[in-house]
Image (cartoon, rainbow, N blue to C red):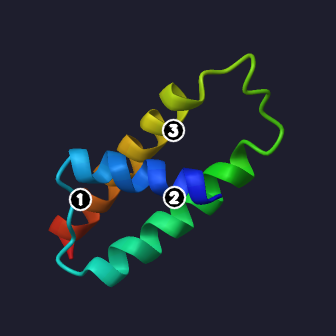
Amino acid sequence: MFETVADISFIAGNRRYYSGDSCIDVSDFISWANEFEEINQFTDWYDQDYMIEIELFANKKINEARLNNKLN
């Protein structure tokens, strides 16, 4: 789980994602990591590329969060 949080945080940093509240961002990254791990609990990472999947997932969540921040 820590690796997933770190990867999501790294991806978000590279995309310069910041909601304006770092505590909310960290909470979101932990929540997203839990969601990713739950979705992929039975994924065979020998058959799937973890880095591609985590990047796709994180980018989707970041895009959704940015859209929600603009609407709120």
Instruction: Place residue 23 in its image quadrant.
Output: bottom left
Q: Is residue 43 above or below residue 11?
A: above
Q: Amino acid at mark 2?
A: Val
The mark that comes first in sequence, 2 or 3, is 2
| Crowd class of label 1 (few under 14; some 14 to 19; many from 20; radius 10 Å) | some
State how far apart marks 2 and 1 are (Cα). Answer: 19 Å
Which residue matches tag 3?
Answer: 54
Tag 2–tag 3 contact (CB < 8 Å) = no
Q: Is residue 68 above or below residue 44?
A: below
| Crowd class of label 2 (few under 14; some 14 to 19; many from 20; radius 10 Å) | many
Q: Is residue 9 above or below residue 60?
A: below
x and y percentages locating residue 34 in the rendered image: 64, 61
Kindly identify the residue that appears in the image at 16 percent across and 66 percent down.
70
Mark 2 secondary-structure assignment = helix
Kindly identify the residue that appears in the image at 22 percent across and 57 percent down.
17
Q: Nearer the viewer, mark 1 or mark 3?
A: 3
Kindly identify the residue that appears in the image at 51 percent across and 58 percent down.
5
Quarter of the image for the N terminus: give it: bottom right
State how far apart marks 2 and 3 are (Cα). Answer: 10 Å
x and y percentages locating residue 18 in the rendered image: 20, 66
The mark that comes first in sequence, 2 or 1, is 2
Given residues 22 and 66, the one toward you in this image is 22
Mark 1 secondary-structure assignment = helix
Q: Nearer the viewer, mark 2 or mark 3?
A: 2
x and y percentages locating residue 33 in the rendered image: 57, 58
Which residue matches tag 2?
Answer: 5
Mark 3 secondary-structure assignment = helix
Kindly identify the residue that appears in the image at 44 percent across and 34 percent down.
56
Which residue matches tag 1?
Answer: 66
In the drawing, what numbered circle is on residue 57?
none
